[in-house]
Amino acid sequence: MSWDEKLLKQAKKIIKLYPQKRSALGPLLHLAQSKDGYISDDSISVISELVGITEVQVKSVSTFYSMYKQEPTGKYLLSVCKSISCEINNSSEVIKKVQEFTGLNNNETDEDGFFTFEAVECIGACGGAPAMQVNYETVEGLTAENAINLCSWLKEKQPDIVVADDMQEDFGGVKSFDWAISDSTGATSTAPGFQTLKTTKVKK
Amino acid sequence: MKETILLTKHMRDNPEDSHLIESYEKNNGYATARNTLLSSSPENILEEIKSSNIRGRGGAGFPTGVKWGFLAEDEDRYLVINADESEPGTFKDRILLERDPHQLIEGIIITCFSANIKEAFIYIRGEYAKPARRVQQAVEQAYEKGYLGKNIFGSEMDLDIVVHLGAGAYICGEETALLNSLEGRRGEPRLKPPYFPAVKGLYMKPTLVNNVETISSVPWIIEHGGEEYNKLGVEGSTGTRIFSLSGHVNNPGNYEIEMGSSFGEFVDTLGAGIRNNKKVKAYIPGGASAPWFRGDQLDIKMTIDDVANNNSMLGSGAVVMMDEDTNLVSAAKSIVSFFAHESCGQCTPCREGTTWLEMILDRIASGRGRTSDINLLLDVCDNISPGLSWPPKMTTICPLGPSAVSPITSLMNDFRDEVEDLIPTKVLL
Amino acid sequence: MSDKVHLNVNGLDIQSDPKKLLIEACEDSGIHIPRFCWHKRLDPVGMCRMCLVEIETPRGKMLVPSCTTEITDEMVVDTESDVVKKAQEGVLEFLLINHPLDCPICDKAGECPLQDQTMAYGPGESRFVEEKRHFEKPINISEIILLDRERCILCARCTRFSDEISGDPLIEFIQRGNKTEVNTFPNEPFRSYFSGNTVQICPVGALTSTSYRFKARPWDLKSTRSTCNGCTMGCSIELNSSQNKMLRILGVDNDSVNQGWLCDKGRYNFEYLNSEKRLKVPLKSVDNNFEESEIQDVYSELSEIIKDRKTKVNFFLGSNLTNEDYVAFREFSKSISDNEQSFYINDDLLYQGHFGQDNELAKIDDLNSSDAIVVWAEDLKEKLPVLYLRVRQAVKKGVKLIVFGHTNETLSDIADVFYGKETVSENFEIIKDVSKLKEIKDYVIDKNITAIIGKSTPQQSDASVSELFEFLKSNANTKILNAYTKGNTYGAFQTLENIKGTKDFVKDISSENTDLLFIVGADPVGRSFYSNEISGILQGLKTVVSLDLFIHETTELSNYVIPISSTLGEKDGTFTNIEFRTSRIDKLVPSPGQTVSDWEFITSLMNFAGLSSNLNSLEDLNNKAFEGIEDSSRPVFDNLDKPSNLDGIINTDTPTINTSENNLSQSLFYIGEKLYGDSVTERHSESISLLGSKKFIEVSQNIVDKFNLTYEKCSMTQDDLEVTVSYKVNNNLPDDLIYIPINRRDLNKFDFSREITVSPSRVKEGLNVN
């Protein structure tokens, strides 16, 4: 097994939450992704043993869902929405410009392992169309120009923690609704932080 | 028209910390749950819900009291909160999760008391990282205070809540697909019959699957009584609902209103009208699955029944306005492409048909359409949803296939010329 | 008053059992509803949508999938309405838009449900003008199975079979939506013992066998139904040949036995029939060399030996003989001597068993109707694979499963209780008081039990096997399946008397009591636990006659080697399975060269030697085999050919097995056999020959630590014999027990009564000849 003691302990804690072991498969895949940035074959082997199903059964589940990446991703996952509300509010322009800036096609990662770009389906930010997420932290009301500014900023500052409030303030526009609560938590990886994962930290 | 504030009251009154338990309790939060557990009975709660006539807020609009009544007897029963909000245009559950998670938890406690359930799951879509953090934090705060776990409020009741994250699959919003996903499987819908969640749900045990907004409404209903809730709105669409307004409006956002006004009134007053004073060409009344209405149909009322009578659905309450300059073929393609991408792949018509529709629309949109394509589109749609009727018939396992048909039938019924304009009728030599 | 359900289909009134699926009820009444994903033996999933029909509901007509709809009384169904026809055309058009135009090069063409249903229900043309989806084609998902993902219509029959029926889900759907494909995990091929069944049930040419790929078209094939003789299950099979060569074996749906399934060995171990190395000419040993001989000369020389009726003759019979073969040897032995004859059959694990009036014998179907199944026998998955599937099926239906012994650890994942090394010692004895075990009290006492009982390993004492059965008999309503596993053992039980096994052969046979030994269809020197002793014995005997298909280690020590036709497909006869069910074995292809059937040889020898017999034909032998059984249930050819008897006829019997008692012996070795080995037939069946070539042992972590084993290989040494093997850690094994499969080359050459030294391998990378 190539998961260290700490990670295995976390894994076992997650499994205990559910009446049946197999239910922990989803969270364990998020855990694996927080470690490697994608679902490696090795992680699949470890998880298959923890949960008690075959490796191909784990892979069957991990490849079904868009968020479990099958190839290594960059430090920053740029997900630009292309669904209906964003589409009629010119998201295609944002997508085009971001692709030009990063030099990436859909689902591609650059050579430095810095950006991964993907055009995604509705992220629930339709009131703030066009919208995108950086490591699943949402920025709403972007213009194509601001989207590029955001990417430049990421490239320059390379923040360890990506905080939605900060990005929104500097690069965002119209919001879907008033976020109200000031929140300095953010993402430290391309796996969403929740439960015992604690992949999020508070920016000091 | 004005908003009627129920669900969004606490968050408006306490914008800075509405997500924290201290703030929630300062506003009498958890009092209803406490009273319920200590002095009410499961049957009473069920009666109140029934008398409120509240209908599910997820999209199907099934009467909640009736759904709770179907739950089969068993030692192990589960409640699953469907927070997999992924219908394009919808973002109402997001505000409830981000800014008032304790209201949801209180609703869960009351619901589980009524249905004798000891374990609840909140299935939040994976992309909602921040809402998930807020909910997880709220759950932990509730545990700390003894509002979850063993002997809640000192009563006999035990309850555990597990926050479970999805991972990017719209189809997991369908209740049986959600249960499969929660069991650690592919998010594929189950056959109904026999797998009705009320009888054979999570782990084949009786399960209640309810939307975030529905359960968030429970505390108010129990505090003020089902009758009071029933007085709000109109018959068949009681209470208040949060509508997500987006598209080409001046003021997009979430608005909590009683149902009964017309879409036009809603957009003009709360939405402040269309940007740049443009006219409405078409609008979607209830999320991407819903057939479109034309710009001259803004007088249709925002109720479940009125929209249904006009051959569409109020669905998830997502209103998307498309102005006169909108390229409707692109819009339709965007929606069809969404369903093709999200199809689970189990059944033949949806798996093959939605992608085929996307390909045909793509050809048409890029100028490579053929005159036979219009009939082809409609025939392919007919093979997914026979008769192209409303409510749709299905050759598929679940309604995702027929949902992909909605924008195409809307396009062909009311905006056929836009499609025809894109198809070259002359071959240039 | 019948409890049938009445429904109206297309205006016709039909009736069926309650809770039956609509598609099945219609099928039974002759109304065919097209389908892809539904299969009679799998749980329905309603995925392909081809079986949609219209039923009347209070809200009007509704399209429902008939494979997931249970019939209800007064249901009104239309399977031919315009709406249904359009839906069928639509589904087929959808399936064909991405399906490649491979018919000219696809194995399935001519027996393809997609072709047939497109012709019958599909549109005449496709309107798809875009590019079809592409995959690399085909890919090997195992040594014997190829997958073409472009042809796959995602009916999930193969994945469902692997998950539900065989319990080894090594193939699954990957990706989502339009990009879904069936695949394996990298470096984890589809190595299932039952993978061939997925090829048979695949409704298109997506899954193909390497052994049949591009070999024939279905309309070229000649076919016959027969019975597999690989183990005592006697699965019903269909043999396919073309141009007199055996090309393929398919499973036949025999409801009582295999229900359409086969193990891969039964399905693919036939290519040896066409091997160049088949013995075609009689051989005689002259000065340690084999020379070709005329069969007349062989008869002549052997007649000389036997005609005075004083020669001491003995028989060592393999398990791949038909009942008629056994009868021929029986009659032969009677004609050459008045003494009581013992017959030695090629079984290291033969023991008394539990037969007789006071022991109720079970049928395989009893597994499904019991309260619980108790297993205390050899590894069912390796030795009786289809019985393993039937046990799984029973457990799925709710029957409790109690497994004793790590020999059956493959059942532990579905067993309600698995008594492993804490309950079963290294000596294969149950060391706890069975009556005190909690689960026994809950599941066994006073319940209906089917017990699968047999020896697990050659050294195990008879008493340790029987003790459990006696307990079950006294404390529950128990029926027993005596788990003998080799071929037509039960046919031998029915036709021979004084039956003994290899252990007694070694004890009894010497040059003092045996002048002439017939070894028929057996290679004990190459395969048996007692191989060294048997080799010694053979070398001391005056005349040894081997009847076999190929040269092997035993024929090397024989004086005469007679080329024989194979029971598989090259001769007619009957076979008796573990339930004492007798069924037909059919000839389909001619046997090569001068081969004769075993019974032909021995009856010809009798005639040549002037020994009287009334056995002039196979029918005579067939009649003789079953004389004494009353006519209606006599499994003679005429009776077995009747349509109602095609699944076989049961006639239970009490065999006379005279094995000597095996007393307790200490052993550090658990001797078993894997399904695939290096038997001479497998070595000559190209497609599967490598599957049984790996030499390995299984040990507990304790052994690994004790002997400091490293890397993945170790050495086993005894005297001059040194074998390098791979080793696998299996913590279900008792600490000091080493599992050795003796049907892997060289491994049976050790003397297991003495110590074998296990040491770390001196070579980091062992020779990888295979």
Image (cartoon, coloured by chain):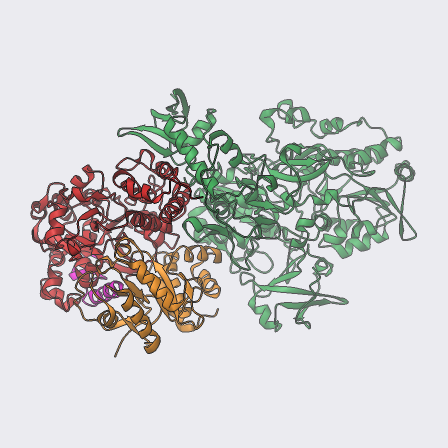
Chain colours: A orange, B red, C green
Outermost residue to the front: B429
On the image, the x and y values in percent for residue C409 come to 53, 55
Q: Which quarter of the picture shows residue B150?
A: bottom left
On the image, the x and y values in percent for residue B423 come to 36, 43
Outermost residue to the bottom: A204
**On the rendered structure, is C215 left or right of B152?**
right
Give the quarter of the figure containing the C terminus of chain C: bottom right
Q: Residue at x 44, y 27 (%)?
A: C26
Residue C672 visible in image:
yes
Residue placed most toward the observer, B35 or C241: C241
**On the rendered structure, is B104 left or right of C327?**
left
Q: Which quarter of the picture shows residue C531?
A: bottom right
Q: Residue at x 61, y 73 (%)?
A: C708
Q: Main secondary structure of the magenta part?
A: helix
On the image, the x and y values in percent for residue C684 come to 73, 49
User: Start and end of the magenta stretch?
Assistant: B130-158
